[in-house]
Image (cartoon, grey):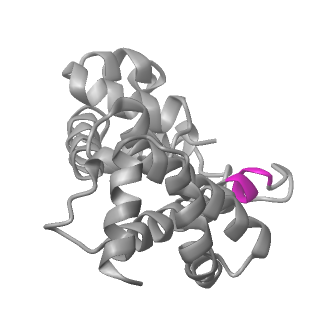
Amino acid sequence: MSTLLEQQIVALLLERDEKAISLLYDHYADTLYGVALKVTNDEAIAKDALQESFVKIWKKADTYDPKKAKLFTWLFRITRNTAIDKLRSNNLKNDREIQLEVSNVYNLGIANFKPEHIDVVKHVNGLEEKYQVVLDALFFQGMTQQEASEALDIPLGTIKSRLKIGLRELRKVFGASAVVLLVILLSV
């Protein structure tokens, strides 16, 4: 693709001109669909990922920096990450649909579970607010890390760091094995 056309698309995106999406679609959709399909191995999920990617591209147009990456590289990363998130979300959804009576996942026993573990929300609320918000989004609202990043307008790396620190703090209260159990219980 010519640099001139790329510059024109970027300028239109920044101006919020809908022609930008048409040009992006005409020149990149097939390739980006191929990227999503390669990640997901599922046509329906790949189509959803592509559509969601175009929405993200439109919403995040002002974050594109031509000094950091070519337009295609930026589009590729958004599409690839969206496809990965869609795949994870779909897999998580499928995992949650496992019948309780067929699965032994829930037969973990309560030998290491203590009464103070029951009040998880109380202990989460005892954390700094920045960790509470992330844990709430991920475990209580069922968001993926990417979805939490977008909903909370926090960089994905920060979401991951706050999750790690928040779980580390809970581990101090519950112990390592209990935190694993809590994560399983909270994500059901």
Query: Which is nearer the eye, 166 or 51?
Result: 51
Q: Tell me which residue sits at (48%, 23%) in the image.
A: 118
Q: Residue 12: where, in percent of width, then height? A: 40, 51
Depicted 45 relative to depicted 170: above or below: below
Query: Which is nearer the eye, 151 or 78?
Result: 78
Q: Residue 106: where, in percent of width, then height? A: 67, 49
Q: Is 49 on the left or on the right of 100, as rendered?
A: left
The boundaries of the magenta stretch are 93-97
Tell me if residue 180 can be seen. Answer: no
Q: Is 164 on the left or on the right of 18, as rendered?
A: left
Position of the N terminus by quadrant? bottom left
Q: Tell me which residue sits at (37%, 62%) in the image.
A: 8
Tell me if residue 130 can be seen. Answer: yes
Q: Residue 153: where, in percent of width, then height? A: 32, 34
Query: Which is nearer the eye, 74 or 104?
Result: 74
Position of the C terminus by quadrant? top right
The magenta stretch spans residue 95: yes
